[in-house]
Image (cartoon, rainbow, N blue to C red):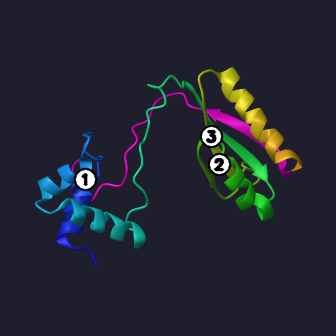
């Protein structure tokens, strides 16, 4: 059950936390509650699955990473979760997930986003993944970003960002 405070907290944070030294205290002040209550509500929403995570979302292009590529891999489904965990733990992979294949056109089931300053650097990182996957990998390719897309999280219905 969502309380009015939970909804107000989601609305106040759906475009991000305040960029201040005290974001939770600032949210509390805006909502007219204590900082402790903000923390309790966020922990509760995380525990029950309404909030997945609180994390920084870097702008890779602004940080100089201009050769960003989604590496896609055809690996044995029986080992895909284990392999995905290994790829997701790599410091140069920002996110990694499984997706269904769409045969015969799309044989790939494991996706890992790789960020590099140049294509040569990204290609080297993808080669590192290929080595790590070894014989478990039947095929792969890299889909390079060609433009920056606007990234936004979930927005509450009827709310403007």
Give the foreground label among 2 and 1: 1
Query: Which residue is found at the position 70% from the left and 56% from the top?
Result: 101
Question: Which label's residue is closer to the chain start, 2 or 1?
Answer: 1
The secondary structure that most of the magenta stretch takes on is loop
Label 1 residue SS: helix
Which residues lie in the magenta part?
Answer: 136-161
Above-or-below relation of 25 to 125:
below
Query: Which residue is found at the position 78% from the left and 33% from the top?
Result: 127
Label 3 residue SS: loop
Q: Mark 3 — residue?
A: 91
Q: Quadrant of the N terminus?
A: bottom left
Q: Mark 1 — residue?
A: 24
Q: Mark 2 — residue?
A: 89
Query: Image quarter for residue 91?
Result: top right
Query: Image quarter for residue 117?
Result: top right
Mark 2 surroundings within 10 Å by alpha-carbon count, few (fewer than 14), some (14 through 19), many (20 or more): few
Query: Which residue is found at the position 51% from the left and 22% from the top?
Result: 64
> Cα distance, mark 3 to mark 1?
28 Å
Question: Number of marks in the image?
Answer: 3
Above-or-below relation of 122 to 39:
above
Q: Residue 28 location in percent, x, y?
A: 17, 57
Residue 23 or residue 114, whichever sits in front: 23
Q: Residue 21 location in percent, x, y?
A: 26, 41
In the image, residue 143 lies in the stretch drawn in magenta: yes
Q: Residue 151 location in percent, x, y?
A: 40, 41
Q: Residue 50 location in percent, x, y?
A: 37, 67
Q: Is residue 109 visible?
A: no
């Amino acid at each position: 059950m969502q309380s009015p405070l939970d909804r107000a907290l989601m609305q106040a944070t759906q475009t991000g936390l305040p960029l201040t030294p005290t974001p939770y205290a600032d949210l509390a002040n805006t909502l007219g509650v204590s900082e402790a209550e903000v923390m309790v509500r966020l922990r509760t929403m995380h525990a029950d699955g309404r909030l997945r995570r609180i994390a920084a979302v870097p702008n890779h292009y602004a940080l100089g990473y201009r050769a960003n590529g989604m590496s896609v891999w055809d690996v044995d489904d029986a080992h895909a979760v284990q392999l995905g965990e290994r790829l997701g733990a790599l410091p140069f992979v920002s996110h990694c997930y499984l997706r269904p294949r769409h045969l015969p056109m799309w044989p790939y089931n494991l996706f890992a986003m790789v960020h590099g300053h140049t294509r040569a650097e990204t290609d080297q990182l993808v080669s590192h993944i290929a080595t790590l996957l070894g014989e478990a990998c039947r095929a792969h390719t890299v889909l390079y970003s060609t433009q920056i897309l606007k990234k936004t999280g979930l927005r509450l219905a009827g709310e403007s960002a």
